[in-house]
Image: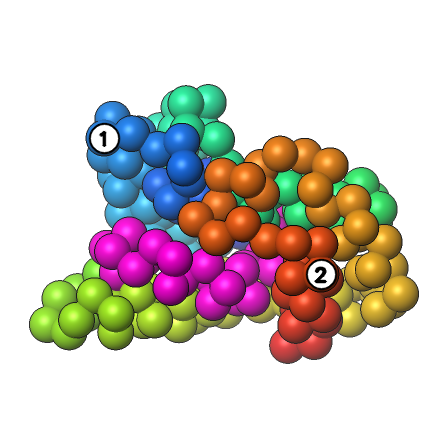
Amino acid sequence: SHMTAATGFDAFAHAFEGYISAGASPYTEILSLTAMDLIVKHLEIAVEDGSNMDAREAMAWADTLAGIVISNAGVTLPHGLGMQISGHCPHVAHGVSLAVTYPAFTRYTCQSAVTKFARVGRIFNPGLDTVTDEEAANGACEEIDQFLQSIGMWIGFKDMNIAKEELKEIAQCGQVLSDYRNNPRVASMEEMYEMLLKSYER
């Protein structure tokens, strides 16, 4: 269901953002990797068949691990922006507010965390084991795009009836929460606005 997709992607975002966060530690990194591996294997199944208890159980455990991660390592840029998106546009669920900016966010951040992005890319696609970290990091951005498509979360602001004018207001509030400071590449308000504009239409 859409709710499973939205909440499941939020769990992925907790694990992924905690993994690349400035606050990450060897302890949280192991939990992040375990959670992402579980989510990549099970979320699509849970979305397609909500009665699949193995997939649900795997997602529940992944969500728990990812929760431990963010309580220790924090989240990064998409969460700070996502809170503002849902605050300005209350009809947008939290998981959806993350999904909408993820394609722009991953490409903005990728070059500042190549090794970690590469590791995530290889969780999605073991075929990336044979290429350089640089290629695997770029591959991670593509894989996350495909993941969003596979769970029905490939969405732009336009699809949610959010006008371009509202994006400026959201960007102006983008630094209210300090999450953005944990990102491997710290964005200015102008850069946040650019990311939001890139997320307008899919």
Classify 10 Å Cα crowding around label 2: few (below 14), some (14-19), many (20 and above): few
**Nearer to the camera, 6 or 194:** 194
Q: Which residue is mark 2?
A: 190
Element carrying mark 2: helix
Q: Is residue 111 part of the magenta span, yes or no? A: yes
**Rounded to the nearest whole Å, what is the CA distance between mark 2 and mark 1?**
33 Å
Horizontally, is 164 left or right of 134 in the view? right
Q: Which residues are magenta?
A: 93-120
Front label number (2 vs 1)? 2
Would residue 104 be visible to someone looking at this image? yes
Q: Is residue 62 part of the magenta span, yes or no? A: no
Whichever of labels 2 and 1 marks the residue nearer the N terminus, that label is: 1
Is 42 drawn above or below residue 129 in the view shown? Answer: above
Residue 17, percent across and down? 44, 43
The image quarter containing residue 22 is top left
Tell me the amino acid under the disc marked 2.
Answer: Glu
Residue 138, percent across and down? 34, 71
Q: Farthest residue in the left direction?
A: 130
Residue 167, percent across and down? 80, 60
Q: Farthest residue in the bottom direction?
A: 202
- The quadrant of the rendering that contains the C terminus is bottom right
Classify 10 Å Cα crowding around label 1: few (below 14), some (14-19), many (20 and above): few
Q: Which residue is mark 1?
A: 26
Horizontally, is 70 left or right of 160 in the view? left
Would residue 52 be visible to someone looking at this image? no
Q: Residue at x 53, y 60 (%)?
A: 105
Tell me the amino acid under the disc marked 1.
Answer: Pro
Q: Residue at x 25, y 56 (%)?
A: 115
**Nearer to the camera, 171 or 92:** 171
